[in-house]
Image: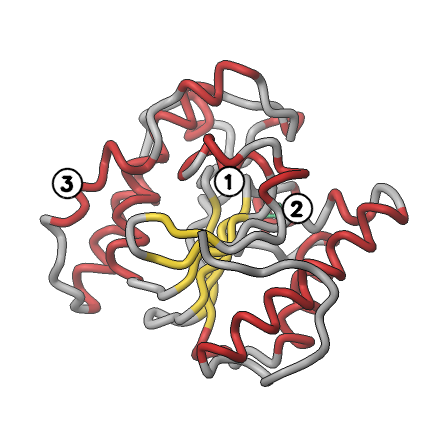
Amino acid sequence: MVLPERMRRLPTVDQFWPSARRTRRRSLSEWKRLNREIDRCRRCSLGSLRTHVVIHRGSLRPRVLFVGEAPGASEDRAGIPFVGTAGKRLDRLVAQLGLLESELAIINVFKCRPPGNTFNLEAALACRPFLARQIEFLQPIMIVPLGANAVSAFRPDLLPISHAAGWLSRWRGLLFFPMIHPAAAARSNALRRRWERDGKSLLKVLSRLGAGAGPAPVSSPATTS
Ligand code: URA
């Protein structure tokens, strides 16, 4: 998805965080209530265009939370994040990282498919409170935003994605490790190599945390700023 300049000026997830913190109870019924709210959402025009709202895949107690941009056509049909071509690349990364199902979750910044995969300002504003509440509930130790759109929901200061990807920093006390979007990795050999290199850095970070498959050689920087 192309990232317009005005997107950098949108309120980030931080602005919805205080309200998110009021939903601290982490009962299953709280999660189901949030999912019902997202499922019924008609705050923007995408609500009436979608086949399915796309909410979450994976654990409810993840250590690592991947945050994608927006559902594509396959995800819209299935109602599950990252089940299309980009999802296959992400699944391969997850397998290489040795992450167990219980250690990871996958969500998106946008909960409904934007037709033509174009940026939608209304949707961005409507979805961010939900994104904040999902993260507050899931309480991961690390967020891995995939692509510029996902990074900009949290830390637009880190953009462009070519600079942000592969570097470990923090967002609200959580580890924050941006990567390029898996769909972008299919666009050129250079981007595929970048995806693979940053994946190796992520593996190194995770092994330090005791998550995933353990140590492996890395070739790119991974430091906490
Ligand atoms: N791309 C995304 O960013 N999210 C999905 O769920 C699928 C493709």
Q: Distance of mark 3 from mark 2, alpha carbons?
A: 29 Å
Going 9% across and 48% down the picture, which residue do you hit? Answer: 22
Q: Nearer the viewer, residue 166 or 23?
A: 166
Q: Is residue 49 left or right of residue 15?
A: right
**What is the number of the mark on residue 150?**
1
User: Which callout, 2 or 1, points at the residue further toward the start of the chain?
Assistant: 1
Going 74% across and 65% down the picture, which residue do you hit? Answer: 219
The yes-or-no answer for disc 2 within 8 Å of ligand 1 is yes
Q: Residues within 10 Å of mark 3 (few under 14, many from 20)?
A: few
| Amino acid, disc 3 | Pro
| Amino acid, disc 2 | His
Asked if marks 2 and 1 touch (Cβ < 8 Å), the reply is yes
Secondary structure, mark 3, is helix
| Amino acid, disc 1 | Ala
- The residue where tag 2 is placed is 181
Q: Position of residue 32 (x, y in %)?
A: 25, 59
- The residue where tag 3 is placed is 18
Q: Nearer the viewer, residue 24 or 207?
A: 207
Quarter containing the N terminus: top right
Q: Decide: is 132 above or below 32.
A: above
